[in-house]
Amino acid sequence: MKRLLLIPIVLLFLSCSASFLDPNSCDRIKKKVSKFDNSIIYSTPILDVISFSKYVNSNLDGTYLSVQLSESYLTTGGKGLTLLLENGEKITWDDEDIDVDVGYSSRWTYSAFTRLNFNQIKLLRTYKVTDVKLYIFEKKIRNPERYKSFLKCLTDDLPYDDLPYLPY
């Protein structure tokens, strides 16, 4: 009897886990429409460290990257964000201000929010992010294919895969 009860529970867990880990889950992107100006924000889940947002019909139109890390000690006035890609290339924002906020369990949350340009989006759609550095804090990215896939979902309306990199 216990085995008969255990089988459906295991199957339910596996199906939920598979959909959570499915890197092709565009349906997990949230859409929010402003009641004031009908602008739209599409947001990916905040899974580990990275999330993406896309603003449409607003004064912020574009695709944005958000990075959050939690650390046990406080430091302020930091700048700089770097993404390390699987091909060894780095995407760097040297002057990016780092925000600090009170986190949970006596920790501090460090974050950055920046707009992505065409070349950065193309790189992030092509190569997985393996590591992140936010000011002095570094973190290895777990399951990086999720972020690449979510960004593709957000940016599929433009032909990033068919166009060459643009000069800066």
Image (spheres, grey):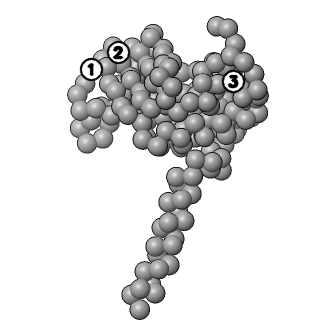
Q: Amino acid at mark 2?
A: Gly
Q: Confirm whether residue 97 shows in the render.
A: no
Residue, x 43% and y 80% (percent of image)?
A: 6
Find residue 75 and name its label: 1
Find residue 78 and name its label: 2
Q: How many other residues sit within 10 Å of disc 1, few (<14), some (14-19) or many (≥20)?
A: few
- Could you tell me which secondary element the residue under label 3 belongs to? loop
Q: Amino acid at mark 3?
A: Asp
- Could you tell me which secondary element the residue under label 2 belongs to? loop
> Does 118 sit left or right of 133 as displayed?
right
Q: Confirm whether residue 82 shows in the render.
A: yes
Q: Position of residue 141 (x, y in %)?
A: 42, 36
Q: Position of residue 32 (x, y in %)?
A: 66, 41
Q: Is residue 44 above or below residue 69?
A: below
Name the residue beneath numbered marker 3. 61
Q: Earlier in the sequence, mark 2 or mark 3?
A: 3
Q: Position of residue 119 (x, y in %)?
A: 64, 18
The quadrant holding residue 168 is top right
Image marks 1 and 2: residues in contact by CB distance under 8 Å? yes
